[in-house]
Amino acid sequence: MRMSDLVGKEIVNLYNGARLGVVGDSDMEIDMESGEIRSIILPKKNNIINLWLDRQHLVIPWEAVKKIGAEVIIVDMDQTSPGYQRSLF
């Protein structure tokens, strides 16, 4: 699968049914040696003010990806998951 095949797919959390974001609005961390995706990094956009003031991102480890469909990517993460973290950029 090519990265371009992922663009436009909605990311949905199996744990709580939340829509986390869209690939294309996100960044990806890639292992430069193997070319494998390590994680998907989604910007948190709660409201228009947080867009400029709060630069937190949601990091989804690739291991949390359970299924890639035609329109969605299903991930399984709860708030206690090691990868369910916010990072500041």
Image (spheres, grey):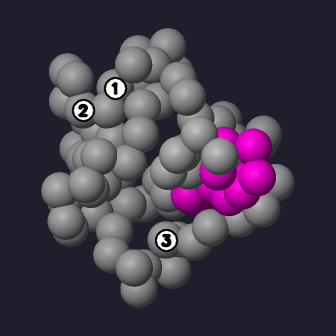
* Residue 18 visible here: yes
Quickly name the residue at label 3: 84
Q: Earlier in the sequence, mark 2 or mark 3?
A: 2
Q: Earlier in the sequence, mark 3 or mark 1?
A: 1
Q: Residue at x 20, y 21 (%)?
A: 70
* Residue 2 visible here: no
The magenta-colored residue range is 50-59
Q: Position of residue 33 (x, y in %)?
A: 77, 41
Quickly name the residue at label 2: 72
Q: Position of residue 35 (x, y in %)?
A: 66, 35
Which amino acid, by three-letter code, is at mark 3?
A: Tyr
Which amino acid, by three-letter code, is at mark 2?
A: Val
| Residue 17: quarter of image | bottom left
Question: Quick check: marks 2 and 1 in contact, CB under 8 Å?
Answer: yes
Say few, some or many: other residues with alpha carbon within 10 Å of mark 1 (under 14 / 14 to 19 / 20 or more). some
In front: 48, or 63?
Answer: 48
Report helix, strand or loop for mark 3. Answer: loop
Q: Earlier in the sequence, mark 2 or mark 1?
A: 1
Circle on res. 48: none
| Relative horizontal placement of residue 78, taking residue 25 as reference (left or right) | left
In the rendered image, the quadrant that contains the C terminus is: bottom right
Quickly name the residue at label 1: 9
